[in-house]
Image: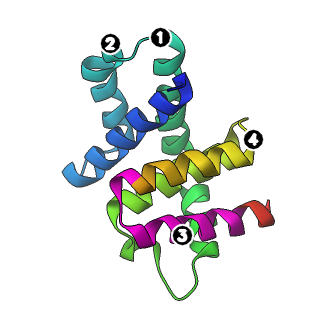
Amino acid sequence: MSARTKARKAAFDALYESEQRGRSLSQALADFNTRQAEKLQSLSEADYVRSIIAGLDTNSEAVDKTISAALREWTLARLFPVDRAILRIAVWELSFSDPPADVVRSEALALASQYSSDDAVSFIGGILGAVSRES
């Protein structure tokens, strides 16, 4: 498993937990730094998790607006929290980071297949496809 794959999973865990507990992303970042960072095997993994969480904290409005624009007859609030977290990470990466779009999409679909429903995989794939086309 690559360093960025591990980092995406750790960021997903932090985002999902923060939403479930009603905590801010800055608190999620602080929690990650105190409890989770040492579990990652390399500094680059922890740094990428920090980049994702801090980037989402800074750019959450733009990310949510991008996701909402790609939704058809659906709202961001109606998404399952797992799907919302996966989409937020992927859209942030597509919009504000450097990995290739195919890698971001593949990693997001892998998270969805592991943590969400079967229908979510195609749903998230469709949303990310729409976001990629608009970029």
* Mark identifier at residue 100: 4
* Mark identifier at residue 102: none
The local secondary structure at tag 3 comes to helix
The image quadrant where one finds the C terminus is bottom right
Q: CA distance from mark 1 to mark 4?
A: 22 Å
**Label 4 amino acid?**
Pro
Q: Position of residue 55 (x, y in %)?
A: 56, 38
Q: Nearer the viewer, mark 1 or mark 3?
A: 3
Residue under numbered circle 3 = 122
Q: Is residue 107 above or below residue 53?
A: below
Q: Position of residue 112 (x, y in %)?
A: 44, 56
Earlier along the polypeptide chain: callout 2 or callout 3?
2
Q: Position of residue 81 (x, y in %)?
A: 33, 61
Q: Is residue 17 left or right of residue 121?
A: left
Residue at 49% across, 49% down? 110
The local secondary structure at tag 1 comes to loop
**Residues in magenta?**
114-131
Residue under numbered circle 2 = 38
Q: CA distance from mark 2 to mark 3?
A: 34 Å
Q: CA distance from mark 1 to mark 2?
A: 9 Å
Q: Nearer the viewer, mark 4 or mark 2?
A: 4
The local secondary structure at tag 2 comes to helix
Q: Residues within 10 Å of mark 4 (few under 14, many from 20)?
A: few
